[in-house]
Image (cartoon, grey):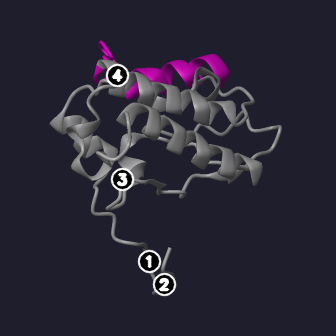
Amino acid sequence: MVCAFQDQDNLYLVIDLMTGGDLRYHLSRRTTFTENESSILIFIQMFNGFLEFFICSLLIILEYLHSNGIMHRDIKPENLLLDSKGYLRVTDLGISTVWTPDNGNDTSGTPGYMAPEVMCRQNHGVAADYYSAGVLCYEFMFGRVKKKNFHLEKLNFFLETLFG
């Protein structure tokens, strides 16, 4: 982050320019990536295998956050940006939190990437971020996760009925 400032209504965060775009953009251009398709993204041709580089970068980011007691809670392609050299940067720490053992009421995140224990309002730890990373890996290898008849309203009603 370069700087932060605010006015009466908003908080503004100025970050470095990420010319590589976000991962959702790259997924929309190409539905899947294989290990041998490192040339798919021009700015990371120097690395042997985009998937390995992407996964390792994401795990290093999560390990750093978790070693500082922070759970991101919203790992998804839109929150992962690539700089001009192809390095991954995490953004949108707006719903991140310091881990506490009693966090069963916290259900923040994007439903398609949320771990089951988060959706079911059970206590959860940093493994929930790794679950989201696993969904991303699956999405990159096999294409977008298919959610037949997935309706957020039905899910919320089910969770409210089940857990009050």
Which element type, helix, strand or loop, lies under badge 2? strand
Residue 132: x percent and y percent? 52, 32
| Amino acid found under the numbered disc labelled 2 | Gln
| Amino acid found under the numbered disc labelled 4 | Met
Residue 61: x percent and y percent? 58, 49
Callout 4: few (<14), some (14-19), or many (20+) C-alpha neighbours within 10 Å?
some
Q: Is residue 159 magenta?
A: yes
Q: Is residue 83 magenta?
A: no
Q: Which residues are magenta?
A: 143-164
Towards the viewer: 12 or 85: 85
The residue depicted at 76 percent of the width and 46 percent of the height is 99
Label 3, label 4: how far apart the Cα atoms are: 18 Å
Which element type, helix, strand or loop, lies under badge 3? loop
* Residue on which disc 4 sits: 141
Towards the viewer: 158 or 100: 100
Q: Residue furthest left?
A: 29
